[in-house]
Image (cartoon, rainbow, N blue to C red):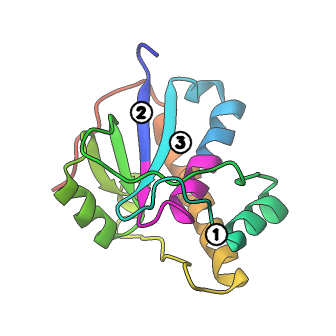
Amino acid sequence: MPGSQRVLFVCAGNICRSPMAEAFLRRLIDERPGLRHVEVFSAGTIASDGAGPLAQTVRVMQTDHGIDLTGHRARRLTANLDADLVLAMDRHVSDEAREIGTSGALHLIGDFAGLPGEEVVDPYGGSLDDHRACASKVKRLVEAVARKLERPPSRFAART
């Protein structure tokens, strides 16, 4: 859509953290007119295309946040994914995304959210409580990101 800003959330497998972030931002886009210019999607640096989200992720998002992630399918990050802003969940993912060569301005999610250095630990292999804590942190960071995105569209310069 003309004048839109494409936001890409990136994690490792695109089955936990980045789908959570995508879903939280989608809900905020639906609720806030100031975000209607934002398009959001997610990918993973080592994702298996077409994989579904982890059961714990689906459960936490449904029971704690009322969001159904059962339809999400993982997508591998490639250099040809067109985004204006790329938000990585942790430094390792940020480094991998840089190596892959993303098209948009790449930031660690905490840095862009105004919480320098804050990362989201991967709950893969963890307990339901680990997924719950991850979802809460992702939600908090996405809300901070959304506040910045509500400003008029502009370019997102990457920090060095």
Indicate the amino acid at tag 3: Arg
Of labels 2 and 1, earlier in sequence is: 2
- Foreground label between 3 and 2: 2
Q: Position of residue 59 (x, y in %)?
A: 77, 67
Q: Which residue is labeled 2 in the image?
A: 6
Q: Amino acid at mark 1?
A: Leu
- Point 26% across, 43% down: residue: 105
Number of the label disc, if any, that sits on residue 147: 3
* Observer able to see residue 49: yes
Residue 44 in the magenta stretch? The answer is no
Other residues around mark 1 within 10 Å, as few (<14) / some (14–19) / many (≥20):
some
The residues bearing labels 2 and 1 have C-alpha atoms spaced at a distance of 25 Å
Residue visible at 51% across and 54% down in the picture: 74
Mark 1: which secondary structure? loop
Q: Which residues are magenta?
A: 9-23
User: Does residue 20 lie above or below 155 as drawn?
Assistant: below
